[in-house]
Image (spheres, helix red, strand yellow):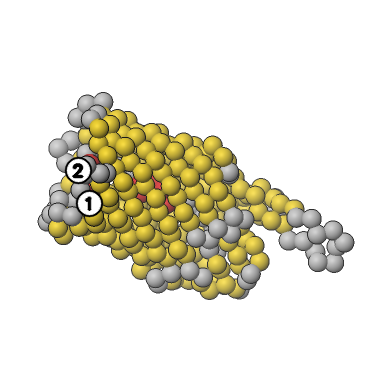
Amino acid sequence: MATGALTASAQLPLSIEELLVSERTLQLQSAVSYSNSQTLVPIPVNPGLSSAAPAFNRRQTRVTSTTSRLRYGVRPDLEINVSAVHARAEWRQPGLAGGADQYRLALGASWLVSAENRTPAVLLTAGVDVLESSWLDPDAKYHGKTGRVGATLYRSIDPLVLSLAAGYEVRGARDIAGGRLQPGNLFFLQPQVNFAVNYRVTLTGGVSVQIREREKVNDATFSLREHGTALNLGLGVLAGEHSTVFVDTRIGTSGDESAQLVLEWLYRF
């Protein structure tokens, strides 16, 4: 079951220098998010019926997740990080309701390929889930089944920072109780503008486009292919010498009906 959480990682910091952690510096990043969405799911059709017209139910899903990430600067242009994520999903549709937990432990890296000069800066990211579970079989554990790559281009024009982030997540097939799950791969594109009100406060705004491929269980469609757009609005505040707090909202404008709220805290040791 998709949660559409990938775009939350595209947030720019208050200062573009913080896109990468400084060399030999450790940073803690924690976030809590809540999302609510409604999607259409296919109803199995009896093959004996004369009409095979597709029918659908509407599924409502609520997801609450917490993320903790440690980032370490290896070089001025390279950082490594480790992330732990816990998410609780609850869903409801006609004749069916339930909930489950999902866990994920991921390793990642960010590399500043090109610093900002006459051309926009280019930052590449990559990561892999070394351990994860599934909504549909919480007791099962998977290793290396999900990987992701991304790129962010940004240009600073004081007091603005213009950015364009894109990412692709590959989700490999995995065994679950009673069958085999093929999650849908995910792509997102997110242009954004950061506006520095002053050195402590930054406003953020942008749009995001997300496409998720069809999900299947035992070759039967479990969740349809989804594509949608959303409006992103946020606020960043320098809360102290070592802390920054972000509040971000995401409101679906096309595709599924969805909304998301993210609270994020960064602490630099």
**Where's residue 268, x and y in %?**
17, 46
- What residue appears at the point 14 percent right and 58 percent down from the top-left corner? 75
For the residue marked with disc 2, what is the amino acid?
Asn
Which type of secondary structure does the marked residue at label 2 adopt? Answer: loop
Verify CB contact (< 8 Å) between mark 2 and mark 1: yes
Badge 1 local density, few (<14 within 10 Å), some, or many (20+)?
some
The answer to whether residue 98 is left or right of residue 9 is right
Q: Which residue is mark 2?
A: 117
Residue 266, position as x, y percentages in the image: 25, 44
| Residue 17 sits above or below residue 172 on the image | above
Name the outermost residue toward the front.
Answer: 118
Local secondary structure at mark 1: strand
Residue 262 tag number: none
**Residue 6 seen by the camera:** yes
Q: Nearer the viewer, residue 239 or 4?
A: 4
In the rendered image, is residue 267 in sight? no
Residue identified by numbered label 1: 114
User: Does 147 sit left or right of 15 as displayed?
Assistant: right
Q: Residues within 10 Å of mark 2 (few under 14, many from 20)?
A: few
Amino acid, disc 1: Ser
Residue at 33% x, 41% y is 163
Q: Please state the horizontal and vertical placement of residue 16, each as a whole percent of the image.
A: 22, 41
